[in-house]
């Protein structure tokens, strides 16, 4: 991209400072500021994001362009620097891309900034979907779960994808069991009790029966937490962060894998 870029608005500078400040220790930031020839008016004793914010503002005022912000991001998101904290760096990159989209910029996976069109809701949802699917795929998530990481389900946050994934688990339990139930009653009859309709193993030893009971309780917990309350609580109370979605979808994926080798009782 061009060497000269307009001065960034104060809100953008603060957001960048907060994101980068969350990723590194004060001593690492000291080295990073030195490497990028940025001033350090507040020094190591200051709050990390305030320190970066002051540095970027001072340099922007001196130079009359936004090169300081670009330089700091390039240094902070360099893959060599983020190698031992790739998951955290990916989250910071997402935060940076959200704020940089207002300036028609984005950070690529190699840490370099490129020009792009201003992000729309659909584009942000698509990016969120791609990231969620990528992380789940790396974890070996079940296809039944991956199918619910679609952009149209991720426009606001991760709740709808989780909600649909739990519904999908219910559909699969109904198909395998032939039961016309939902939520806890479905799980209890399909997987629970002394004579479950769906057996996850030979169900002939105490260990096997305990295993079956454990999976049944996990599945029932998913429905209790993320399926049934939807009918009673306002949507605004069910916003979900990425890490929570990953944990829930990972649990659903494990239940699906057990169902792959299940037998009807």
Image: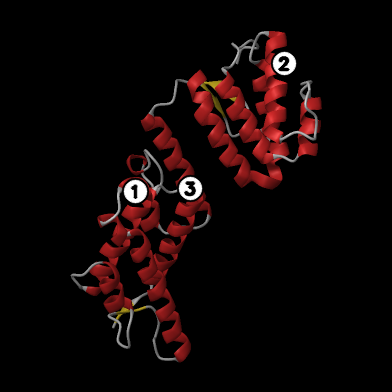
Instruction: Name the image quarter holding the C terminus.
Output: bottom left
Residue furthest left as drawn:
180
Q: Do the numbered discs 2 and 1 sit on residues whose CB atoms are within 8 Å?
A: no
Residue picked out by circle 3: 242
- Point 39% across, 68% down: residue: 221
Q: Position of residue 190 (x, y in %)?
A: 28, 76
Measure the alpha-carbon separation of dots 2 and 1.
43 Å
Q: Secondary structure at mark 3?
A: helix
Instruction: Name the image quarter holding the N terminus.
Output: top right
Q: Earlier in the sequence, mark 2 or mark 3?
A: 2
On the rendered structure, is 118 left or right of 4?
left
Q: Secondary structure at mark 2?
A: helix
Q: Position of residue 117 (x, y in %)?
A: 45, 20
Measure the alpha-carbon separation of dots 3 and 1.
12 Å
For marks 2 and 1, give the one nearer the viewer: 2
Q: Earlier in the sequence, mark 2 or mark 1?
A: 2
163 over 186 or under it: above or below: above
Residue picked out by circle 1: 160
Q: Residues within 10 Å of mark 2 (few under 14, many from 20)?
A: some
- Point 49% across, 46% down: residue: 134
Q: Secondary structure at mark 1?
A: helix
Q: Which mark is residue 59?
A: 2
Q: Earlier in the sequence, mark 3 or mark 1?
A: 1
Residue furthest bottom as drawn:
205
Q: Position of residue 170 (x, y in %)?
A: 28, 64
């Amino acid at each position: 991209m061009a060497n000269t870029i307009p001065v960034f608005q104060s809100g953008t500078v603060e957001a960048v400072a907060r994101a980068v400040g969350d990723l590194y220790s004060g001593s690492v930031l000291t080295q990073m500021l030195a490497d990028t020839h940025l001033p350090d008016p507040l020094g190591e004793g200051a709050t990390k994001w305030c320190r970066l914010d002051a540095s970027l503002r001072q340099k922007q005022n001196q130079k009359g362009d936004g090169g300081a912000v670009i330089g700091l991001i390039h240094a902070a998101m360099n893959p060599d620097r983020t190698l031992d904290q790739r998951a955290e760096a990916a989250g910071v990159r997402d935060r940076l891309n959200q704020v940089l989209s207002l300036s028609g910029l984005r950070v690529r996976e190699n840490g370099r900034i490129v020009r792009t069109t201003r992000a729309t809701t659909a584009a942000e949802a698509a990016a969120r979907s791609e990231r969620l699917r990528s992380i789940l795929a790396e974890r070996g998530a079940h296809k039944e779960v991956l199918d619910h990481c679609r952009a149209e389900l991720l426009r606001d946050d991760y709740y709808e994808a989780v909600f649909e994934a739990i519904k999908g688990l219910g559909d699969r339990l109904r198909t395998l069991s032939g039961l016309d139930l939902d939520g806890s009653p479905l799980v209890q009859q399909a997987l629970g009790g002394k004579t479950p309709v769906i057996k996850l193993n030979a169900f002939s030893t105490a260990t096997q029966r305990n295993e079956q009971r454990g999976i049944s309780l996990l599945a029932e917990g998913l429905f209790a937490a993320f399926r049934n309350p939807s009918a009673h609580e306002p949507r605004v109370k069910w916003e979900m962060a990425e890490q929570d979605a990953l944990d829930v979808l990972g649990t659903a994926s494990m239940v699906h894998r057990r169902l792959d080798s299940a037998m009807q009782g």
